[in-house]
Image (cartoon, rainbow, N blue to C red):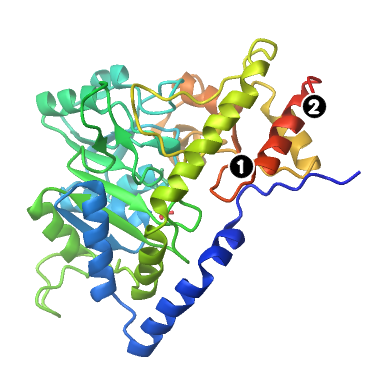
Amino acid sequence: MMKAKVPFFDLANQFKSIEDEIKSVMDEVFQTQQFILGSKVQVLEETIAQYCRTREAIGVASGSDALLLSLMALGIGMGDEVLLPPFTFFATAGSVSRLGATPVFVDIDPETFNIDPSKIVEKVTSRTKAIIPVHLFGQCADMNPLLEITKEKKLFIIEDAAQALGAEYKPKAGSEGRRAGQIGDLGCFSFYPTKNLGAFGDAGMVVTDNPDLAEKVRLFRTHGSQPKYFHKWIGINSRLDTLQAAILLVKFKYLEKWTGERQKKAERYQLLLQDLLPCVKGLRLPTVQYQNRHIFHQYVIRIPERDRLRQFLTEEGIGTDIYYPLPLHLQECYSFLKYRRGDLPHSEKASEEVLALPIYPELTEDQQMMVVDRIKAFYGKR
Ligand SMILES: Cc1ncc(COP(=O)(O)O)c(C=O)c1O
């Protein structure tokens, strides 16, 4: 019997569909021999600012650096505390620690996997300077309660929108949705190759409506130098490559179409997996909160016997992944913060139960049927 083959992601297929365009812009860059920043980066910055509906966008070397530079622009450092969820990629907390500040972990809402606003106030101290909500898997965190808290407590918000380019927060029907990155003081994006808009290497972007913060991020990404070789600030090297910008500009033209495809696949999973819900105890499908625009960077189900299911799917040739197997408060490098298992139970439980299924624009209907078919076979419900 032929084994089903559904990779967890398939960048090669996407590349094939735009190969000629990509090669042609790369050649253009080779001809100019300009590789750092430059007009392509500027055009990409304008494009992303317009897409996120912000005044400014600053291209940087990665999503991790976008977070680091945003924190630097806000002057966050030694002795400061920053609130963030532990159920996220390491960079959300690592950037805080790199500056000598302390990440303070706040548990998540188990429905959305995003920071639980009702758990924030109890963690605010006189040292708290900012909150970093993460728009995990492509859905915005519940931002209105956060905005109220930060207004009252005079805190900053940095949105970790690394997985959420084009996502919208829309708590009420009829109102205009606000774009990820547009809502807090600064928004951070990653163009890591597997992101919805992925470069051919590392790349990232900071967006903001605040021209002073934009200016600081811009200076900090080039060692704080202005004019060249005169340093008003101590920055880092985090410039965006011209080649990456050229590639991202090509891919950007397809982003809305690709997002639509992801949303369609998510809907299809939802429909096809529905009939398992009454018979599989503990199975949960992703939920879209409010009228949000979820861009489905990942389609993540929850299931108590996650590891056994994953093993079965791997044997059947179906790729899956786990985001994230250990919440950050329990990571070895943070043992000095003295968190214990049980402190943030929703994040811990999510780490044991989540399973990301293949979702990408090029995933065919047949492939998707195979994924569902194999999940149903695992539960004996074909
Ligand atoms: C939630 C989150 N934050 C930050 C990052 C860091 O981005 P990068 O890998 O571009 O440094 C990522 C990407 O992997 C992410 O998923």
The disc, 1 or 2, on the residue closer to the chain's N-terminal end is 1
Q: Say if 347 sits above or below 356 in the image.
A: above
Along the line of sight, the residue nearer the viewer: 369 or 334: 369
Q: Quadrant of the N terminus?
A: top right
Residue 71 is left or right of residue 30, and the answer is: left
Q: Which disc number belongs to residue 205?
A: none
Counting from the top left corner in percent of width and height, residue 283 is at 62, 19
Helix, strand or loop for disc 2: helix
Q: Quadrant of the C terminus?
A: top right
Q: Residue at x 28, y 64 (%)?
A: 44
Q: Say if 296 sits above or below 75 in the image.
A: above
The answer to whether residue 251 shows anywhere in this view is yes
Q: Which residue is mark 1?
A: 358
Along the line of sight, the residue nearer the viewer: 49 or 250: 250
Q: Residue at x 75, y 29 (%)?
A: 308
Residue 41 is left or right of residue 246, and the answer is: left
Counting from the top left corner in percent of width and height, residue 316 is at 80, 40
Residue 303 is left or right of residue 117, and the answer is: right
Residue 279 occupies which quadrant of the picture?
A: top right
Identity, as a three-letter code, of the amino acid under mark 2: Ala
Identity, as a three-letter code, of the amino acid under mark 1: Pro
Q: Say if 22 sits above or below 214 in the image.
A: below
Say few, some or many: other residues with alpha carbon within 10 Å of mark 1 (under 14 / 14 to 19 / 20 or more): many
Q: Say if 204 sits above or below 89 in the image.
A: below
Along the line of sight, the residue nearer the viewer: 339 or 23: 23
Counting from the top left corner in percent of width and height, residue 26 is at 43, 78
Q: How many angstroms separate mark 1 from mark 2 (CA)?
A: 17 Å
Q: Which residue is mark 2?
A: 377
Helix, strand or loop for disc 1: loop
